[in-house]
Amino acid sequence: MPAEPSCPPLPGSTRDWWRNAVIYQVYVRSFADSDGDGIGDLDGVRARLPYLRSLGVDGLWLNPFYPSPQHDHGYDVSDYRGVQPEYGTLESFDRLIRDAHRLDLKVIIDVVPNHCSIEHPWFVEALAAGPGSPARARFHFADGQGEYGELPPNNWRSIFGGSAWQRVPARSWGGEGIERSQWYLHTFAAEQPDFNWRHPDVSSYFEDVLRYWLDRGVDGLRIDVAHGLHKADGLPDHEHADHDELTGDPVNPHAWNQPEVHEVWRSWRAIADEYTRRTGRERVLVGEVGLLDTEQLAQYQRPDELHQTFYFEFLRAEWDDEALYDVIDRGLGTIARSGSSVAWVLNNHDMPRSVTRYAGGAPGAGPGDLDLGLARARAAALLMLALPGSSYLYQGEELGLPEVTDLPEHLLTDPMFHRSGGVRRGRDGCRVPLPWRAAHDTFGFSPNGTPGTTWLPQPDWFAEHAADQLLVSGDSMLHLYREALALRHRIPALTSGDLRWLPTEPGVLAFTRGDGFVCVVNCLPRPVCNPVDGALLIASDPEAGDKLPPNSAVWILPPDGT
Ligand code: NOJ
């Protein structure tokens, strides 16, 4: 591995690159398979870098590729410094970084500090060491309640459903009979034990991990559940224990958003800034912070903490002009006041795809009205890409992929499905391997002629969304994204101008950026008159002109400003 200071300066290494960047999220397992095992890998990603370059994004974020028993597809990490063999090797990772940088693409990787895998050496050691041992102090082990310790230590629920506590299997430690067996805390699946962030080993371990990957040349880290980490002292019961057991507990005030977590982000920021200064390449920290309160969210991206946090409110908003106006205005107002910029998101690996959401479909409940969903998703893409700040695209979003809502239950792999007793279908439907070539086996996901199938089955209708098909069809979703991203690079107002709302009729949103760029969105199910004159730069619906079709958006350059 080359030592970072000897890296030559990279093109495009400007400060603040992240503020307006468009980053493409690569779910490695499902992006592209180079070796024919039906599972995506790092060499598959590397082979598709030119595709990402021509799409016009500024960088990519890789979901976890670390060694892991894959109980939560890599979010259960057993070695924070390696690569899962089915995804490649450290050498393939280094080659990927090198080639991405040659193409002027930034690389952000995922880091998972709240929990690890039951196969992480520290947890294996803790199980073997027994109650009261120093090794157990790095996690949250506790005695159970009840006469025989048979009840969990408190009433916390796992996000994936069921109790957040798992009892240590009897006799996993020499002599620990069931009557003495402790419990451990897992905010997510039982295979993902939570670290005890009040233990000094944990913070220093992760600072080393951070430096390790920064030395390997990454441009940034996406931080998993960045509002997690610390738990309230004494692990008290959640007072409102009437929360829904099936859907887990995203709001437990003792498990989330503890004030001490901000100290961690300040120390990580100092490390990222040190690398920025030392290497002349700005390194960034992007947090997944699942807080609904925008003011609280903004606290995580103060100038000495994380650079950005994803703004999931945008993804959650209904297709409705008032709902969209509210979340956009709140996001811009609150988050920009923190000195950062908003990271807009319409899709990711945890949510049903936007085409399906806007279509009224859902996993297990059917696809909904996909024409409607696609029209809205196209308009939403133009809306998002016209907003001040950065955007995170999720693989397949540019292909207009709907959710696969009807995967057979016996193939579902998401721990959420199993822990909810099948009530929640989980997230497999947005993780089906991508279609690249309509006429190839596995739609080009694996090398052509590869026997076998992909790790989740692709439906036949994926052929209509294959990248090669969309490239030859002028008004495809892929062209929409490519053209919009090219315009973002060409029109300065799109990356520098403040947003100003324009008056419109109900059901329609319009705003300007800088001098003379306008975005108009018609959220209504009927056509409206286009309220702005000027040159049409791009339209989500080819019929757009003097009239805006239902569920459409346009970008306009007015003749002399507005
Ligand atoms: C958030 C990740 O996005 C999700 O995929 C994962 O299951 C949980 N964190 C647990 O790591």
Image (tube, rainbow, N blue to C red):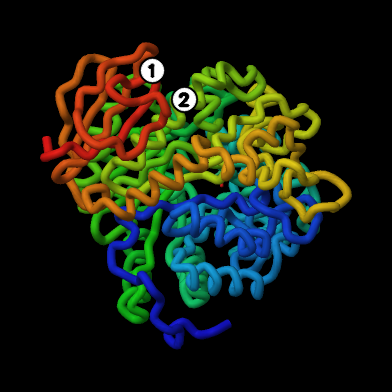
Above or below for 442 versus 145: below
Q: Residue 213, image x and y in percent?
A: 51, 71
122 to 380, vertically: above or below: below
Residue drawn at 40 percent across, 24 percent down: 543
Q: Where does the image place residue 134, in percent across and percent down from the top left?
A: 59, 64
- Identify whether 294 is placed above or below 109: above
- Sequence-earlier tag: 1 or 2: 2
- Relative to 215, residue 394 above or below: above
**Which quarter of the frame holds ligand 1?**
top right
Q: Quadrant of residue 162?
A: top right
| Residue 517: percent from left, percent from top | 21, 41
Q: Which is more toward the observer, 245 or 535?
A: 535
Kindly identify which residue carries mark 2: 375
Decide: marks 1, 2 in contact (CB < 8 A)?
yes
Quadrant of the rendered structure where residue 319 is?
A: top left
Location of mark 1 (residue): 550
For numbered disc 2, what is the local secondary structure? Answer: helix
Residue shown at 31% from the left, 53% from the top? 20
Disc 2 crowd rating (10 Å Cα; few below 14, some 14-19, many 20+) is many
